[in-house]
Each structure stands twice: as C-alpha cells, then as structure tokens.
Amino acid sequence: MAGWVLSECGVRPIPRIYTKPTRTSALNSIQSNFRIPTPHSSFCFPIINGGLFTKHRNWVLKVSAPSITQQLEEEEFDAGAPPPFKLTDIKAAIPKHCWVKDPWRSMSYVVRDIAVVFGLAAVAAYYNTWILWPLYWFAQSTMFWALFVLGHDCGHGSFSNDPKLNSVAGHLLHSSILVPYHGWRISHRTHHQNHGHVENDESWHPLPEKIYKNLNNATKKLRFTLPFPMLAYPIYLWNRSPGKKGSHFNPDSDLFVPNERKYVITSTVCWTAMSALLVGLSFVMGPVQLLKLYGIPYLGFVMWLDLVTYLHHHGHEDKLPWYRGKEWSYLRGGLTTLDRDYGWINNIHHDIGTHVIHHLFPQIPHYHLIEATEAAKPVLGKYYREPKKSGPIPIYLLGVLLRSMRKDHYVSDTGDILYYQTDPELN
C-alpha cells in the first residue's frame, strides 16, 4: 500500500522501497544528516527516499515546538529544593536607596491615617444613618488595619533608625487598636526568624499530625470553618496557638526572655489604658454608639489581619513546603511566603501584600518594597510566585481562603520537608 507525504507541490506518494537498509547504515545516515533544533526553532523532518535522507529536496514538514529545555525546567522545578542563590545575592540586587528610612515620610503616613480615622468617625457620627454605617465599618476597619501595618513597621525598625521614635509611634498606633506593642513585636520577630519552620514558627504555622489528631472535634471545626479562624487574633494574643503556651500580656511568658520583661509590662499598661478609655467612652456616648464607632471596626480589623497574614503563607495553587531539622534555613523558609495583590487596598494598607522581600529583609521600609521586589525577581526566578492581579476590591481572595481551609490541615510528624495533608473526615 502506497505511503503519502506532504510536499511543496501538495500530496505526493513515496516511491516503493525495495531494499531495507542495515541498522549501521541507517544510524550513520541519521548521524550525518539529523540536526538538533535550537530552542523555539522548527523541527525539520527530511523525507525518506529509498532509505536515504534526501537533503537536496525541500520536502519537509515544519512543526513549531516549545523549547525542550524549558519543558524540562517546568517539569523538574522543585519548590522544596535548596535555591541556587544565596541571601547575599538577593540583597546585592536591591538598590541601595531602598534601604534608606525616612522618618518624616513615615510620620506623614501616620498623620494621614489618623486624620482619615477621625474623619470617618466624625462623618458617621454626624449622619448616624443605617445606610452609611456598613460603608463606615468596612472603611474604618481597613484604616485600623493600616494603623497596624505602620506599627508593624515600627516593630521591625523600618519606620526609622531611632528606637525611641519607633517605640513611641508603635505604642500610639498599636495601643489604639488594642494590640500590646512590645509583646506582639517580640513574638513577630520570632515569626520572621523562624518562618517556614513547622515547630518554631510563631504565626499560622501548620500543626504536626500528632497535635492535630489530639484536638477535639469542636476545636478542629472552629479552626477550619469560616469565619471563626478570621477572629482568632485576640485569642492568639492571650493564649498563642495550639501546642504552645504563653501570653503576649504576661512578662513571664515563654515568649520572652528576662531582659524583655520591662518592655512587655510597658505595652500591657498602654493596652490597659486604652481599654479603660473605651470603657469611659461607653459611659459618655453609650455602649451602642461605641460599638458602632469602634467595636465593629475593631472586629473588621481583626478579620483583615487574620486574612492577610494567613494568605501570605497559605493558599497557593501549588503546594508549598514547610521545613524542620537540617532542611530548614532562613532563606528557604522565607521563600515559601507569598505576595498578594489587594487592588485599591494596596496603597491604603501600605503595600503589605508585597511580602516575600519583606520577610527576607524586614528592615526595608514599606514604601520601597515594590521597587526592591522588582529588582530581586531576576535572582529569585521561579522561587518567586507572581501574585494574581486583583480587581479594585480583592473579593477573589475569599475563594482562595476557603479552598485552603478545606485542604490544608496538618503535616506529618516525620520528615524534614513537609507538605500540608487533608483530613477527609473534617470536610
């Protein structure tokens, strides 16, 4: 039966082959005539005529194909493998001016945000209509979250080079939203120093299987059923995470060393003073009005905080590793964090979604994080995961959160490179 080929003249039959070439002659012919295509070039298949490759005829079938090298790289990339670069390589790629802290610029953000907070409260109290209150609650809770982020910069020392200014501004900002500044600052430092470590991380770290299995069903449901995980922050401040003991208000907690005692006491006193002020205001304006002006925005702020901090370490479509033992390093742990896009909220909450570079270099001020990230991307390569672009309001992140809560439950008790496992009974 005749064979056919595609040629420049149309469809053409192949002449009958009467002799079968030996294995040796065929291999020699292939070696002498076959060319390895370059990346993104076309594969050219010469037409066989009588068992020989006929180079003088232009009867070829051209097929565009992606680079074989690129295909292999896609298949072979392992997010849990040690990166081919060092922390110093990333640091060297970031422009020097990105490390410069401008206290006047930092204070301008504080003045701006406080002015917006009081402005929103004044407008809501003046009109006092239920048409306006839901809009106020969303806007004010977002501004409370923005205040937290500025205090967060104070805690890292990226607000300014003056520790006293950082402490004063940090206490002002965090006490106003019922966060114990030094207690949180110290535990958050522990989080950064141990990011990506199963046992030693402090914030939203996975539960080892043994601890998870020992939780009662009610605790499991509360931990992984929305909206309860998004209200966890106040509980965490008092009791920390399952499997860990201590309180951010107690200077004798396991969170702190003895020479930090005075700092924790100072912050607890400031927190207590703010609580007393709120109690006094409830007598002046009434508890319902205080609830509308402060209580509900505070709960919204807590949900912002839990949502953002959780999604910076969870919810990527590809499973990301966690580490323990000899496999953990500061660099590898930091590379498991994620950037997120929050649309219009990016500028309001001071680009906290630009999180990977922040985790590796928390000394960089928030207003330089975007530029620093762009400069570091060529070094990071595939270890940087480009965030999905958001609309004006990042509603899509709620879907990401829900999917993660349904499948990211615990990690194994053994092994040094670990990935989340799912409890089918929980779902």
Image (cartoon, grey):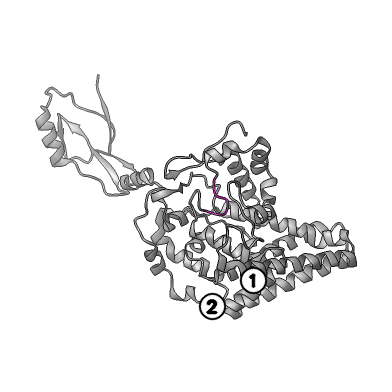
Query: Which residue is at a point 51% across and 60% down the rendered structure image?
Result: 192
Determine the secondary structure under disc 1. helix
Work out whether residue 239 or residue 204 is closer to the camera in this orientation and state it.
239
- Bounds of the magenta span? 201-206
213 lies left or right of 322? right
The amino acid type, in three-letter code, at marker 1 is: Gly
* Disc 2: which residue: 161
Residue 383 picture quarter: bottom left
- Marks 1 and 2: in contact by CB < 8 Å? no
Res. 279 mark: none
How many numbered circles are shown? 2
Work out whether residue 273 or residue 371 is closer to the camera in this orientation and state it.
273
Does the magenta-highlighted stretch encompass residue 356?
no
* Disc 1: which residue: 170
Query: Which residue is at a point 50% across and 49% down the rendered structure image?
Result: 199
Position of 14 relative to 221 (above/below): above
Please state the horizontal and vertical placement of residue 253, each as a whole percent of the image.
Answer: 61, 58
